[in-house]
Image (cartoon, helix red, strand yellow):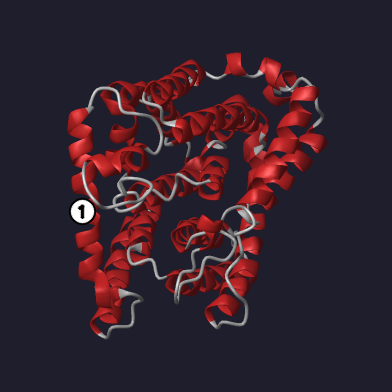
Amino acid sequence: MVTDELSPLNWQLNRILITILFISNFFPFYITLIVFVVELILLYALGVFRRIDSRQQASPYLWIFIAYSLVISIIFQNIVGAFISLGLAVILVYFHYYQTIIKPYYFEELLNMALIASFILFIFAGLEHLDYIPEWDYTFISDIMGRTHNNRVEATFFNPNYYAMMLEFFIMIGVYKATRTQKLRKKFVYSFISLCNVVALLFTGTRTALVVVIACLFIFFYVYGYKRTAIYSFIAMGAATLTLYYFNLLPRMEDIFYAVTDRFEIWQVAGKALLDNYWFGQGPLTYMHVWQDYGEKYTQHAHNIVLDTLLNYGLIGSSILIVPMIKFGQVINRMRHYPQLRLRLALICAIIGVVLIHGLTDVTIFWVQTGFLFLFIILAAQQMLNEVENHPTIYQKTHRIE
């Protein structure tokens, strides 16, 4: 198989390394980073990375993009952006390895681990919501990280909005698993965990989270081919959400108009900065680098994934990403032609939907834990496709609904 050719490690060791990093992603981010660095050093020492880059079709364009990001950050003295660019290079190396080595059957096991972790985190979040335990303390890293979020939970994800995106991912995974299995007991377990994650989503106080979940469940069922289910569930959940809003049962809705005004102020500052440098950008976190020149609204990013990307990299830098996006779109399109991949395709499309729809008002994907889980899921697509195209008979015999 391709995976055996590309890596001198045997599959058992590969699986252990992937599992350790995957599980660490549900611990506080500094633990994730420590595990990530240790694994990178180990994989480099074993010579794993030397034979991977040439096999990735989109790789040259991603490297050009990262080089562009680094150079433009240095030119505009965006030191934080320069370090982030270097970090992106390291992440690219690792996830090329992951994309090459992951086996579709083990991808399913990773999703099970994610759901188990999500239930443990739900208990943790519940205790945090009831004030039995405090928020995680990050002040040993920096006093700036000691900010508390009143009446909002973050579990191990540093910020309630990051936890909200993780929960949106968890809910999509839970629905995928409940749809995939034919065993009632497992359907109940997956559904129960998904409902727990919906409750935790309310604990985060992220105003748009339920809207994201409703929209992405529609995407999931529509792509899977259950179009009536998609429409009926969208209407039902939309009506339920409006009812909760009417009776003032949704969190933090009393200051929704302030939140909308706040977003428009941020977008206005970002828009002014973009008009002054729409060709090149100034690298990652440009908003944080230039906000004082255009207004009084401080934050780290533009709170819109499209606006923030253009602000960071300009039209030139952003256009470099078009080719990798097209390459991935081709993989998605090819998956569409295989009925046995339709459910996995629905999950991947729903996960992408989470990023794009949540990204209309925030850029929570630009974080270690949310970004890693996103990549762990969508980058398994190529191996899923390879398995069906290269071994259709074997796949038909060994593929089974769990």
Out of 318 and 289, give the one closest to the viewer. 289
Residue 395 point in image, percent of width and height: 64, 36
Q: Residue furthest bottom?
A: 247
Residue 68 point in image, percent of width and height: 41, 20
Residue 202 appears in view: yes
Q: Say which residue label 1 marks.
A: 265
- Give the residue type that dot 1 points to: Glu
Q: Residue at x 51, y 56 (%)?
A: 144
Q: Quadrant of the C terminus?
A: bottom right
207 is higher (above) or lower (below) than 286: below
Q: Quadrant of the N terminus?
A: top right
Out of 281 and 365, give the one closest to the viewer. 281
18 is higher (above) or lower (below) than 257: above
Out of 316 and 194, give the one closest to the viewer. 316
356 is higher (above) or lower (below) than 322: below
Q: Quadrant of residue 13?
A: top right
Residue 124 point in image, percent of width and height: 62, 72
Residue 344 point in image, percent of width and height: 51, 45
Give the side of residue 245 with respect to residue 117, left or right. Answer: left
Mark 1, Cα crowd under 10 Å, few <14 / some 14-19 / many 20+, is some
Give the side of residue 202 with respect to residue 97, left or right. Answer: left
Total numbered badges shown on the rendered structure: 1
Residue 226 appears in view: no
Secondary structure type for disc 1: helix
Q: Residue at x 54, y 28 (%)?
A: 86
Q: Residue at x 38, y 47 (%)?
A: 300
384 is higher (above) or lower (below) than 364: above
Out of 220 and 102, give the one closest to the viewer. 102
Give the side of residue 34 with respect to residue 384, left or right. Answer: right
